[in-house]
Amino acid sequence: MEHTHISPLELQDNLIKIIGKDYMLVTAGTMQQNNCLTASWGGMGFMWNKPVACIVIRPQRYTKEFIDREEFFTLSFFDESYKKIFAFCGSKSGRDVNKVKECGLTTFETKNGSVAYTEARLILECKKLYAAPFEKDGFICKDLLGNYENGDFHTQYISEITDCMIK
Ligand SMILES: Cc1cc2nc3c(=O)[nH]c(=O)nc-3n(C[C@H](O)[C@H](O)[C@H](O)COP(=O)(O)O)c2cc1C
């Protein structure tokens, strides 16, 4: 089934659920060289008069190198039948395996040259607007610093949703 382009304003999904409970693949790179990871932290909303998506990426992720190199990345959401790919892409590194091949996914190029999957039921193409690592002093709730015992603070990326593709 082909994807249809819609406005982000037409999204009907519960975004808290699809990110936090169903998970997404964050993919960056080119058709020649790309990588993805499973993510369950992030959000979507409206900033600087634009529809935006926010993701947080730890410094050690191979995918981060691709996100930092490129202007765009994608967020892909799948039906329940693809649940297995999240365990795989969330535990293996693209430094060691070809995740697309191992998961049997089919890539295609999005309109701004990023990479997404034919099998995804919802794809958001995102253009980076702001990126910065979290800082220790910024945490009002110090309990959260337990997430960062190695000092590996996530980098937060706030990005404009430049395309929204749905099946
Ligand atoms: C359910 C789930 C959610 C995850 N969410 C994130 C996340 O939001 N940010 C992040 O940096 N890593 C997250 N991870 C970890 C990465 O997906 C994992 O470390 C992955 O193997 C990194 O692959 P890479 O080295 O190829 O980039 C999550 C893993 C799982 C299983």
Image (cartoon, helix red, strand yellow):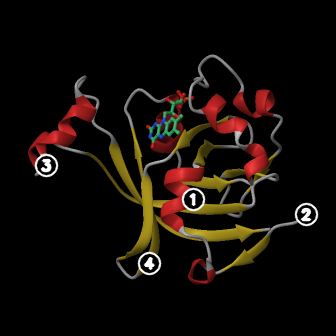
Residue designated by label 1: 18
Q: Is residue 134 above or below residue 87?
A: below
* Label 2, label 3: how far apart the Cα atoms are: 45 Å
First of labels 2, 4 by sequence position: 2
Q: Residue 10, how many percent across, how many down? A: 62, 83
* Label 3, label 1: how far apart the Cα atoms are: 26 Å
Residue under the image location 13 percent in, 49 percent down: 141
Cβ–Cβ below 8 Å for labels 2 and 4?
no
First of labels 3, 1 by sequence position: 1
Residue 11, quarter of the rendered image = bottom right
Q: Secondary structure at mark 1?
A: helix
* Label 4, label 1: how far apart the Cα atoms are: 21 Å
Confirm or reject: label 4 Cβ below 8 Å from ligand 1. no
Q: Amino acid at mark 3?
A: Cys
In the displayed structure, does residue 140 sit left or right of residue 62?
left
Residue designated by label 4: 50
Residue designated by label 3: 141
First of labels 2, 3 by sequence position: 2
Q: Within 10 angstroms of label 3, few (less than 14), some, or many (20 or more) residues?
A: few
Comparing marks 4 and 3, which lies closer to the viewer? Answer: 3
